Image (cartoon, rainbow, N blue to C red):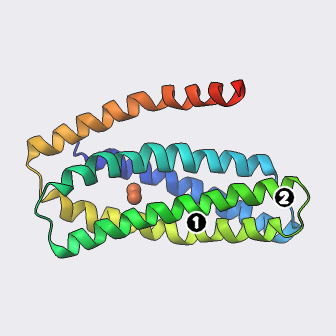
Amino acid sequence: MQARGPLMIEHRLIERMLWVIKDVLAEIESIHKVNPFFVDIAVDFIRVYADRTHHGKEEGILFRELNSKPLSAKDRRIMNELIEEHIFGRQTTKALVEANTRYRNGDENALADMSHKFRTLIEFYPKHIEKEDKVFFPSSRAYFTDDEDQAMLAEFWEFDRKMIHEKYKSVVEGLER
Ligand SMILES: [Fe+2]
Ligand SMILES: [Fe+2]
């Protein structure tokens, strides 16, 4: 498998979550309420899986390695766009968490804010995935030898191995506080 393999497999699970969110969004718009526990689960998925585990490998390993390569102006520009989009995703998720807290506290405007943030995510994220799968991953592969690509793949597996421990350590720490 090439290093981009696990990243593309992760994209498929992220897409499935986006389809779930899309269904819930349609429900929110028809019944004008949401289960705040669903929002918690969606946020946990986005933060721990899509951001920490997935973007963590993209930024911390793939983009780090690309930084030492003579990237073309176009590839450099796309990589910077991808980083900006990751930041935008984090900001949107943070706003979603805040709206969910306000919803739990009875704020009437919170539901509309949550719908808006969910819609933002389901509209922007598939384009981000497509840009990586179809444009950036194929063009960035050309900067690496087969050995370098396999070294990144090995580092990806090692990164993933730590994730489950990090996740549940943070769960315990959250409960201890
Ligand atoms: Fe990304
Ligand atoms: Fe990605």
Q: For the residue labelled by badge 1, is the local secondary structure a helix, a strand or a loop?
A: helix
User: Relative to 108, is 23 on the left or the right?
Assistant: left
Q: Earlier in the sequence, mark 1 or mark 2?
A: 2
| Marks 1,2: beta carbons within 8 A | no
Q: Position of residue 165 (x, y in %)?
A: 49, 25
Name the residue type under label 2.
Tyr
Q: What residue would you read off at disc 2?
A: 103
Q: For the residue labelled by badge 2, is the local secondary structure a helix, a strand or a loop?
A: helix
Between marks 1 and 2, how big is the CA–CA gap? 19 Å
Looking at the image, which is closer to me, 66 or 130?
A: 66
Which label sits on residue 92? none
Which label sits on residue 121? 1
The residue at the point 46 percent across, 32 percent down is: 163
The residue at the point 32 percent across, 30 percent down is: 158
Q: Residues within 10 Å of mark 1 (few under 14, many from 20)?
A: some
Q: Position of residue 90 (x, y in %)?
A: 54, 58
Decide: is 123 above or below 86: below
Farthest bottom residue in view: 74
Question: Could you say which quadrant of the image residue 131 lies in?
Answer: bottom left
